[in-house]
Amino acid sequence: MPANNAFDRDFGYLMPFLDKLEAHARGLSDAAARDELLGLLSGEKERFTRIRGLLGGAAPTSTSSPAAQPMQPAKPAFTVGNLTSRKRP
């Protein structure tokens, strides 16, 4: 990777920041919040390490991996039916 990569300074801040977020998430007492935050952070360091490599001239992979795919937003779950329990007289 070239030493003059325009993003080296940014990655120098980003990677420790991701570490801090993960450490904080692991200490959350709210299990639902902890699990969601850890899920959101899952794989971020690996993705940004790969991005940094590509910016530095690494060869792209010939096969696409799930980690290389853009994140798909969660599909909304809608309920169908009347929102009131029954008709009022």
Image (tube, rainbow, N blue to C red):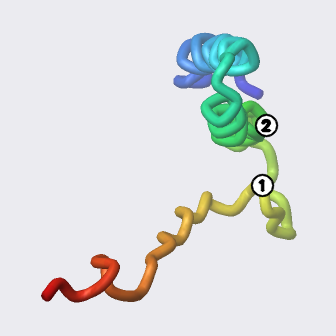
Q: Nearer the viewer, residue 62 or 20?
A: 20
Residue 15 visible in rendering: no
Q: Nearer the viewer, residue 8 or 81?
A: 81
Q: Quadrant of residue 15?
A: top right
Q: Nearer the viewer, residue 43 or 28?
A: 28
Residue at the farthest front position: 89
The answer to whether 54 is drawn above or below residue 79 in the figure is above
Q: Residue 33 location in percent, x, y?
A: 61, 31
Mark linked to residue 67: 1
Residue 82 visible in rendering: yes
Q: Quadrant of residue 29?
A: top right
Q: Earlier in the sequence, mark 1 or mark 2?
A: 2
Q: Amino acid at mark 1?
A: Ala
Indicate left or right for 30 with 42 as reference: left
Q: Nearer the viewer, residue 25 or 3?
A: 25
Quarter the N terminus occupies: top right
Mark linked to residue 80: none
Q: CA distance from mark 1 to mark 2?
A: 8 Å
Q: Amino acid at mark 2?
A: Glu
Mark 1 in CB contact with mark 2 (< 8 angstroms): yes
Label 2 sits on a secondary structure element that is: helix
Q: Residue at x 79, y 62 (%)?
A: 66
Callout 1: few (<14), some (14-19), or many (20+) C-alpha neighbours within 10 Å?
Answer: few
Q: Residue at x 63, y 18 (%)?
A: 21
Residue labelled with disc 2: 46
Q: Quadrant of residue 22?
A: top right
Q: Residue 47 location in percent, x, y?
A: 72, 41
Q: Residue 54 location in percent, x, y?
A: 71, 43
Label 1 sits on a secondary structure element that is: helix
